[in-house]
Image (spheres, grey):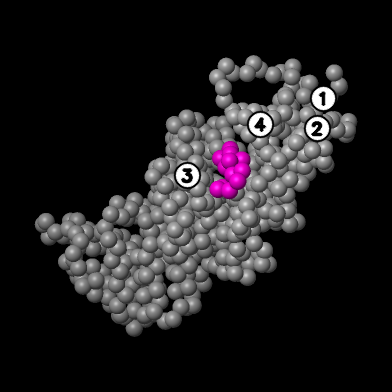
Amino acid sequence: MTTGDPLDEARSRATPAPSERRREPWPGPRPLLWAPRAHTVELVLLLPDGSTSRRPMRLVGAHEPGYWRADEQISPGTDYSFSIDGGPPHSDPAAAHVPSGIQGPSRILDERFVWRDHAWPGADLTRGSLLHLDVPTVTPEGTLDAATGLLPDVATLGVDGVELSPVAAFDPEAGPRAGVRLFAVHEPFGGPHALQRFVDTAHRHGLAVVLDLPHRWAVADPLRLDRFGPYAQGSRIAPRPRKDHGHDAPRINLDGSGSRGPRDFFVADARRWLHEFHVDGLLLDVEALADRSSAPFLTELAAVAQDVSARTGRPRALLADGPGLSDRLTTTVERLLTGRLDGPAGDLRRLSTEITAPARIPAGRRRALRAAQRSGSFVGPVTRLPAATRAVPWSRLEDVAGSAATTSADDDATLLAFAVLAGSVVVLDTEHVPVRPGSADARRLAAWTRRLLTLRPAALTDLAHRLEVTTDDGALVARRGGTALVLVLDPAVPALDLVPRLGTPSGAWRVAAAWDEERTHLEDGSLRAPRRCVVILRDDPDARPAGADPRTEP
């Protein structure tokens, strides 16, 4: 027996295998690798004295073609690599811990963690409200532990949870677009245990956690996953206009030859976050996960979410995200408010079109989304504020270059109102919703957000009704059932007659919220409000004539 050999140390502690046949955890203490093209695979262990030990790995069997597995479990904290056909060591594609970098040796993670979120019942994210937290920028420290310190303040805003920007490990010099290790948490962010502490604390403050999985970067060329097998296929995802310096990205092999391996890989990753890390939802870039198979991959991920939900008794959700899905409404509103469209009349027509038109989803992705949504665990698309778009893998150039925030607190309030009262999952950002407000405007925006979120449940009950939008006289009035949003853009409008626009008796509506309450007045169906001051109206049942229902469709 070799002194310090981690295989021998683990052997003495090994527990009997369960009698029921089941797959072992991946990643786990017994290394597993999908390498269908390899003739031989060796496990390369870094021993305490600095030397290495090579141990042959064996094919799992015909029931799992292409998989190689170590003979024994390895002690937590041991560094290891894989050698293909006698070649140099390579990092594990499914490494759970990469403290030496994504191209260095992998490390067996000690998965033990004392969870204290037993009272957390889970959250229904079907129409949830989330606050996006970009780990490297939301605090000066740029760590998960520092972001954890913000959670008590986030809870006071009234959101249902937080959306974390991608935390997957990447090369700090090359950036995440040069490739990520999906199963590992970026070490400068605090590593995997910091993420566990974040989720545990969030749950104890009544907040769900949604994790953004950067699949678009998971098979990037610098990772050299082709050494192991066909993780990528021939076609590629084109770069965003004038972004990524013209570099495209490989497409994940989800429907080509050998696609069972990559599918297993990404399914195992999703299951790991949902089950082992107690994450409540996963944000999925549907463009990166598009495939043409008869069984769309999104349906496999939906089945994972359903299975974890059933096993834990807590709901899990998958959120559809991507270009053209999550950024249409707020991008249009922001351009309207910053004067980058073609005048008040054209602005309002454009906004009306964006509000009422369905998302333009390519046929292939639309089929996959519909199939996944039938599972009940897939929700979306989401409506996200501009700054909540910058850190997502699919973001466009305009969301990265310069501030996407609007130019004044008045405009920020309008953008918040459109987003919060939209019928989809909403992702707010810390530019428009300050977590720890310092200035008077910031405190006012935080209070405005809380007010809008209290109105959101009532607005969501009206989703079965048709959205009616009028854009006459330089003002927009958007009404769905018993909720209406009013925005005056033309300063020449002294008062707005709501009766013809809402089609109800003049006394049937009340002001539920107004950004400028002191200068907003509603009397006999005539609304007076400052320019660019957003006003939310609610149907007042007590003021209606007997038997009248303003939500009745004409």
Can you identify the residue that label 1 sits on? 5
Seen in the picture, residue 405 relative to 203 is either above or below; the reply is below
Mark 1: which secondary structure?
Answer: loop
Give the residues drawn in magenta, as a range: 254-268
Q: CA distance from mark 1 to mark 3?
A: 45 Å
Can you identify the residue that label 3 sits on? 295
The reply to whether the C-beta atoms of the residues labelled 3 and 4 are less than 8 Å apart is no
Report the number of numbered marks.
4
Task: Count residues near mark 4 (Cα–Cα under 10 Å), then give few for <14, some for 14-19, many for 20+.
Answer: some
Which three-letter amino acid code belongs to the residue tagged 2? Leu
Q: CA distance from mark 1 to mark 2?
A: 9 Å
Seen in the picture, residue 527 relative to 490 is either above or below; the reply is above
Which three-letter amino acid code belongs to the residue tagged 3? Ala
Observer-side mark, 2 or 3, equals 3
Q: Earlier in the sequence, mark 2 or mark 3?
A: 2
The reply to whether the C-beta atoms of the residues labelled 4 and 1 are less than 8 Å apart is no
Q: Earlier in the sequence, mark 3 or mark 4?
A: 4
* Magenta residue check for 260: yes
Q: Where, quadrant-wise, is the N terminus in this rendering?
A: top right
Observer-side mark, 1 or 3, equals 3
Can you identify the residue that label 4 sits on? 28
Q: Earlier in the sequence, mark 1 or mark 3?
A: 1
Q: CA distance from mark 3 to mark 4?
A: 28 Å
The reply to whether the C-beta atoms of the residues labelled 1 and 2 are less than 8 Å apart is yes
Mark 3: which secondary structure?
Answer: loop
- In which quadrant of the rendered view does residue 41 lie? top right
Q: Position of residue 61 (x, y in %)?
A: 64, 28
Viewer-proximal residue among 85 and 212? 85
Viewer-proximal residue among 331 and 319? 319
